[in-house]
Image (cartoon, rainbow, N blue to C red):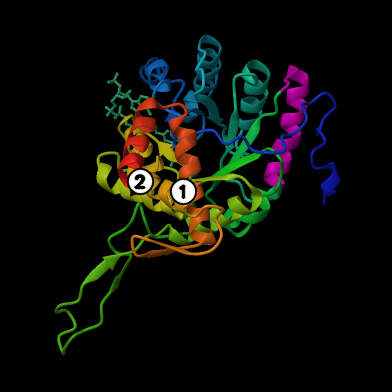
């Protein structure tokens, strides 16, 4: 076990000092693109203006014979563009693949100064993060980087879920964790064939009302991902890192996508992946608190004074615990509004109306 006092020492001579706090910048949507796909790559400069995070994907969804093209494409795109406040992330190939070593060596030494976060798929336990942590330090030292790269793990194996707390706390580089429902379903041997979302067969049914067991019994579809998202959120909150919902593969079903994203938002996630341009606005809408919620949160904060005691507002009891929830919503709204005048105006208008 590593001594806690060494936790913030660089893991290689000449590597930058690890961060002590994870930077909390907007990351409502992590937009995936294949850097080796010319059509997608051509859209990237425009898409960059609309998203919080752009992610050059090298792993699943990139054909084996296009892995090198994807890696080279990402290097070229990063060198040719300045994405301003939009973060640039990558998802490297899995640690058991023949490509990951070249992914890390090439990306860190060629464009390490342009990358913010490296997403690592199929993480099984802290040992995977430790491997990446040391290798990144060696490569950062070789590249002369002054800012450490952060690491994001995908929660998509049964052992990853069993070890999620130790993964979240495995390195000061840990920025966050995303749920990967597709690989996780396969790893768990679930009997689904989808990329995220619900399943009509996963349901509860009301009790029978008479002799006929088929009559008058309402069914309610349940959320297959509730347990895992909640566990992931707790592990992330415990270690001061950020939780995300991952992919929603039914691109056409924008309604269910919004529902899945909102469930994750309400449970504590800060963002989700957008696989297609149509999912960008869904994530933006869902992961930006609604103006009416922001107005309510600001009203409670204003009326609670120093935040202690109990008051009644519109027939509802408020105390220290509810004002803390309101601060979470209001602080997120302020952070998002700082870079988005339209959102800022919507929040201010709703607040004005609520406060009278
Ligand atoms: C389980 C997991 O690992 S999930 C993560 C891995 N998966 C991914 O990264 C998938 C990324 N997305 C995609 O590959 C594609 O969006 C697909 C395959 C789902 C759909 O692609 P298409 O069938 O081309 O969709 P569609 O025809 O609606 O695309 C419209 C345009 O948007 C472009 N486009 C589609 N997705 C993206 C994207 N993610 N980023 C940028 N541009 C995109 C298309 O190239 C197309 O361009 P064109 O108008 O110049 O022809
Ligand atoms: O990588 C994501 C997944 O769902 O698998
Ligand atoms: Mg996966």
Mark carried by residue 112: none
Q: Is residue 201 above or below residue 50?
A: below
Q: Which residue is mark 2?
A: 355
Residue 300 on image: x %, y %: 44, 53
Residue 139 in magenta?
A: yes
Q: Residue at x 32, y 45 (%)?
A: 356
Name the residue tied to disc 1.
Answer: 302
The answer to whether residue 237 is magenta is no
Residue 40 visible in this rendered orientation of the protein? yes
> Are dots 2 and 1 in contact, CB under 8 Å?
yes
- Residue at the far bottom in the pictured view: 211
Q: Specify the segment rendered in magenta.
A: 127-146
Point 56% across, 41% down: residue: 121
Q: Position of residue 90 (x, y in %)?
A: 54, 29
Q: Quadrant of residue 61?
A: top left
Q: Secondary structure at mark 2?
A: helix
Q: Is residue 48 above or below residue 221?
A: above
**Which of the two discs, 2 and 1, labels the residue nearer the N terminus?**
1
Left or right of 171 on screen, residue 39:
left
Ligand 1 in which quarter = top left
The image quarter containing residue 159 is: bottom right
Give residue 247's quadrant in the image. Answer: top left
């Amino acid at each position: 076990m590593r001594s806690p006092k060494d936790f913030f020492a660089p893991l290689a001579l000449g590597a930058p000092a690890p961060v002590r706090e994870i930077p909390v910048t907007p990351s409502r949507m992590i937009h995936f693109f294949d850097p080796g796909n010319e059509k997608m790559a051509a859209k990237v400069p425009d898409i960059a203006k609309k998203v919080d995070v752009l992610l050059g994907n090298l792993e699943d969804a990139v054909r084996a014979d296009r892995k090198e093209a994807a890696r080279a494409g990402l290097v070229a795109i990063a060198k040719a563009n300045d994405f301003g406040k939009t973060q640039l992330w990558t998802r490297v190939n899995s640690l058991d693949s023949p490509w990951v070593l070249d992914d890390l060596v090439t990306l860190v030494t060629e464009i390490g100064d342009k990358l913010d976060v490296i997403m690592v798929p199929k993480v099984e336990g802290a040992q995977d993060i430790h491997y990446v942590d040391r290798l990144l330090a060696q490569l950062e030292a070789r590249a002369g980087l002054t800012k450490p790269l952060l690491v994001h793990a995908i929660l998509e194996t049964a052992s990853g879920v069993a070890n999620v707390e130790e993964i979240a706390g495995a390195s000061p580089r840990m920025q966050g964790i995303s749920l990967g429902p597709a690989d996780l379903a396969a790893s768990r041997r679930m009997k689904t064939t989808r990329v995220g979302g619900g399943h009509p067969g996963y349901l509860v049914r009301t009790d029978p009302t008479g002799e006929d067991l088929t009559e008058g019994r309402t069914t309610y579809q349940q959320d297959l991902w509730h347990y895992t998202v909640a566990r992931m959120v707790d592990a992330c909150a415990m270690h001061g890192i950020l939780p995300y919902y991952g992919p929603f593969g039914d691109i056409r079903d924008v309604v269910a996508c919004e529902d899945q994203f909102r469930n994750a938002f309400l449970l504590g996630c800060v963002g989700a992946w957008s696989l297609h341009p149509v999912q960008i606005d869904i994530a933006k809408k869902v992961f930006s608190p609604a103006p009416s919620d922001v107005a309510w949160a600001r009203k409670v904060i204003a009326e609670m004074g120093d935040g202690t005691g109990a008051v009644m507002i519109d027939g509802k009891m408020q105390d220290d615990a509810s004002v803390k929830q309101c601060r979470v919503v209001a602080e997120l709204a302020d952070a998002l509004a700082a870079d988005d005048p339209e959102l800022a105006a919507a929040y201010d208008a709703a607040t004005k109306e609520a406060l009278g």
